[in-house]
Image: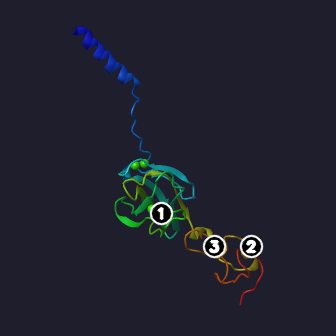
Amino acid sequence: MKACKIWLWCCALAIGLLMPSVTLAQDDHGDDAASATAITTDGTLYDGELEDGADLDYFSFNATDGVQYIIETSQLGGNCDTEIRLFDTDGTTEIDSDDDSGLDPLASRIDWVATATDTFYVSVEPFGLLTIGTYKISIRTLAAICEPCNIDADCESDNCGVPASGVGLDLCIPAGAASHECGGGGGGGGGGGG
Ligand SMILES: [Ca+2]
Ligand SMILES: [Ca+2]
Ligand SMILES: [Ca+2]
């Protein structure tokens, strides 16, 4: 009987040693504003992963009053389908949300003009319980890079004109912008104003 017990104990020990250790996926970004990851607004792509259907990944960024920001996810991996929410400076009052307005399929995008110079928050979550995987998040400014077209020489610059809105169209459009109408498209030179 004793030998049998020792044999069983040895079996249990062997199974324990041979079983692969089960490691739970580590969450890469905090689940609330208090534990948000601070990111820049220069368009840098930050890595994120929705490890499970209940995951929330929070990010914080510093905004300047009156500047337009484009907040978006991209390069979704696995079965990922993101939904993003923009929160006010308190981290809990929702300003806007989006599911699929991003350039990539199922990716998200919010265009927003800051209402204060302060820290705001963005969360990323899976659209459904099973739509998890990796993603990239970025925040960049739009209006800040466009300048008025005043003379023909300005038209050579890609920053001349007014911001163009729309998915995948984050450009300054010269034609008819400001006081000087540039001839031709795409920031090419020439063409006098009326
Ligand atoms: Ca995560
Ligand atoms: Ca998280
Ligand atoms: Ca989506």
- Residue type at mark 1 is Ser
Q: Secondary structure at mark 2?
A: helix
Residue type marked 2 = Glu
Element under label 3?
strand
Q: Quadrant of residue 161?
A: bottom right
Indicate if the residue with disc 2 has its beta carbon within 8 Å of ligand 3.
Answer: no
Circle 2 Cα neighbour tier, 10 Å, few/some/many (<14 / 14–19 / ≥20): some
**Above or below for 40 versus 101:** above
- Label 3 CA crowd tier, 10 Å (few <14, some 14–19, many 20+): many
- Comparing 15 with 61, the one in front is 15
Residue 190 at what x, y percent from top left?
A: 78, 80
Q: Which mark is residue 156?
A: 2
Q: Earlier in the sequence, mark 3 or mark 1?
A: 1
Is 184 situated left or right of 119 in this image? right
Viewer-nearest of discs 3 and 1? 1
How far apart marks 2 and 1 lie (CA) works out to: 32 Å
Task: Identify which residue is drawn at 44% across, 67% down.
Answer: 116
Circle nearer the N terminus (2, 1): 1
Q: Residue at x 48, y 63 (%)?
A: 108
| For marks 2 and 3 on the same chain, the one whose residue lies earlier in the sequence | 2
**Percent x, y for residue 188?**
75, 75
The crowding category of the residue bearing disc 1, from other C-alpha atoms within 10 Å (few below 14, some 14 to 19, many at least 20), is: many
Residue at far right of view:
190
Assign a secondary structure to mark 1: loop
Between 50 and 30, which is closer to the camera in this rendering? 50
Task: From the top left corner, tell me how far across and down residue 174 is, in percent.
Answer: 67, 78
Q: Nearer the viewer, mark 2 or mark 1?
A: 1
Q: Amino acid at mark 3?
A: Cys
- Per the image, the residue denoted by label 1 is 108
Viewport quadrant of the C terminus: bottom right
**Disc 3 marks which residue?**
172
**Do labels 3 and 1 touch, CB within 8 Å?**
no
